[in-house]
Image (cartoon, rainbow, N blue to C red):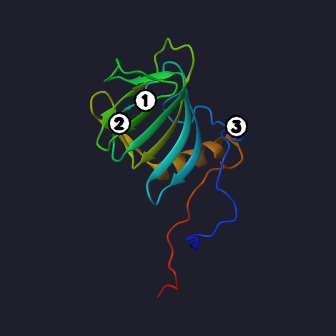
Amino acid sequence: MIPTPAVAHDELLTLNTHDLPMYKDALPGVPGVDAQPLFLDPHQGVWVLRAVFHPGVVLPLHYHTGTVHLFTLSGSWHYAESPDQPQTAGSYLYEPGGSIHQFMVPADATEPAVAVMVVHGANVNFDHDGNYLGIMDASDIMNMFDALIKERGMEPARYIRPAPAEYTAGAK
């Protein structure tokens, strides 16, 4: 017997990154990072982005509160702490929650590094002296894209966002 779907949907939730805008310099304070939001779930704390990191990009040192799955599609990058383990086209990287590192693309790279990341939780960002800079999670990323789009006069971003929790019957 075929089970009844738990959630009814009439069409696949699918996006083609070639049909979506790539938001240039999307990360405030870090030029050279272009990004596309693909899935943002502030309720479960999951965010999926396709990002282009241009040569010379160095992200802040950051601590992950949850796991990360990162697929490198093209180019090359590495963590400052692991320069002998470059991630190149075709690499899949799993980061356990609690890891801390600094992402960088060599300044002499001949092409940008393009990656798709599935992040659970948040990045807690620090400067080189260990001072807290801020947090980046699914809610923050939604707000970041909303502000960027409003500032640039662009159409709203198209990405997948699950519905928030709701009561099965009227609230009391």
Indicate the amino acid at tag 1.
Leu
Please give the name of the residue rendered at 56% of the width and 13% of the height, measured from the top-left corner: 110
Please give the name of the residue rendered at 48% of the width and 14% of the height, measured from the top-left corner: 107
Please give the name of the residue rendered at 71% of the width and 44% of the height, measured from the top-left corner: 154
* Near-viewer residue (84 or 169): 84
Q: Are marks 1 and 2 in contact (CB under 8 Å)?
A: yes
The residue singled out by tag 2 in the image is: 62
Q: CA distance from mark 3 to mark 1?
A: 25 Å
First along the sequence among labels 3 and 2: 3
Indicate the amino acid at tag 2.
His
- Residue 172 position, x and y percent, is 46, 88
Q: CA distance from mark 3 to mark 2?
A: 30 Å
- Residue 104 position, x and y percent, is 43, 24
The residue singled out by tag 1 in the image is: 59
Q: Are marks 3 and 1 in contact (CB under 8 Å)?
A: no
Task: Write down the quadrant of residue 82 in the picture.
Answer: top left
In the displayed structure, does residue 18 sit left or right of residue 124?
Answer: right
Task: Write down the quadrant of residue 5 in the picture.
Answer: bottom right
Q: Residues within 10 Å of mark 3 (few under 14, many from 20)?
A: few
First along the sequence among labels 3 and 1: 3
The residue singled out by tag 3 in the image is: 18
State whether residue 145 is above or below residue 52.
below
Tell which tag, 3 or 1, sits nearer the viewer.
3
- Residue 10 position, x and y percent, is 70, 65
Indicate the amino acid at tag 3.
His
Provide the secondary structure element on which disc 3 rests.
Answer: helix
Provide the secondary structure element on which disc 1 rests.
Answer: loop
Please give the name of the residue rendered at 68% of the width and 43% of the height, measured from the top-left corner: 16
- Residue 8 position, x and y percent, is 62, 70
